[in-house]
Image (cartoon, rainbow, N blue to C red):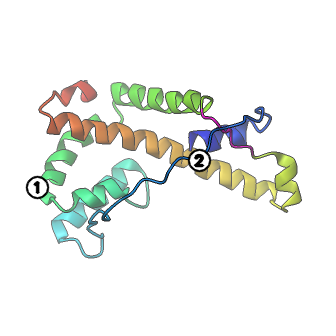
């Protein structure tokens, strides 16, 4: 998302000659997800609270996966929710987002979204604006998700989750 954001915001980025494509990772099995419609009522309530708190109309797959362990999800969310939106949380989220944007410059291939190519493809200004807003929304959401998963990992490893909430 960061590389795509940079490509849309700065289409004049010089072309790079990248490396060979990476091998696609092998995933022997798919994660088990607990769909919102099929989740038990207490889990659906947690899902609704997560969506409301995160300001998104849908759940990230990590929460749907955590739904397999409703006790964990409940404890995780009750610990994480008070941290969301605090100055420290926002500072860390903003730093993650800034890091992703700066690190995208180090990728072997830049993503180019030049206006001339979009014009040629018949993409309207409104469609470009909507696409840019969507990319920025996902970049923001992913920075939150990385931080939230790190929070879960700290808790699972017995660390001090209050470090994020402080």
Picture coordinates of residue 107, whole percent (x, y): 60, 34
What residue is at 15 percent from the left and 59 percent from the top? 70
Local secondary structure at mark 2: loop
Quadrant location of the N terminus in the rendered image: top right
Position of 102 relative to 36 (above/below): above
Q: Which of the two labelled residues, at mark 1 and mark 2, occupies the earlier sequence position?
A: 2
What residue is at 88 percent from the left and 49 percent from the top? 116
- Is residue 97 shown in magenta? no
Picture coordinates of residue 133, whole percent (x, y): 63, 49
Q: Toward the viewer: 105 or 2? A: 105
Q: Of circles 1 and 2, which is in front?
A: 2
Q: Which segment is the magenta one?
A: 107-112
**Which residue, given by chain and number where applicable, does mark 2 sit on?**
21
Within 10 Å of disc 2 (Cα), the crowding (few <14, some 14-19, many 20+) is few
Local secondary structure at mark 1: helix
Q: Is residue 81 left or right of residue 17?
A: left
Please give the label number shown on residue 71: 1
Tell me which corner region of the image, top left, top right, bottom left or bottom right, holds residue 6: top right
What residue is at 55 percent from the left and 29 percent from the top? 103
Q: Residue furthest bottom?
A: 38
Q: CA distance from mark 1 to mark 2?
A: 41 Å
Q: Toward the viewer: 82 or 12? A: 12
């Amino acid at each position: 998302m960061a590389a795509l954001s940079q490509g849309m915001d700065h289409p004049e980025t010089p072309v790079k000659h990248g490396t060979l494509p990476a091998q696609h990772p092998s995933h022997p099995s798919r994660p088990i997800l607990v769909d919102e419609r099929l989740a038990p009522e207490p889990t659906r309530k947690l899902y609704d609270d997560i969506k409301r708190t995160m300001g998104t109309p849908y759940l990230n797959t990590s929460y749907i996966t955590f739904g397999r362990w409703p006790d964990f999800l409940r404890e995780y969310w009750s610990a994480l929710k008070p941290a969301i939106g605090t100055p420290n949380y926002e500072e860390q989220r903003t730093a993650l987002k800034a890091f992703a944007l700066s690190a995208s410059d180090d990728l072997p291939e830049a993503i180019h979204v030049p206006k001339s190519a979009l014009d040629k493809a018949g993409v309207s200004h409104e469609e470009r604006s909507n696409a840019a807003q969507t990319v920025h929304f996902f970049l923001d959401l992913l920075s939150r998700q990385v931080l939230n998963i790190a929070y879960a990992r700290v808790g699972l490893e017995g660390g001090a989750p209050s470090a994020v909430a402080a």
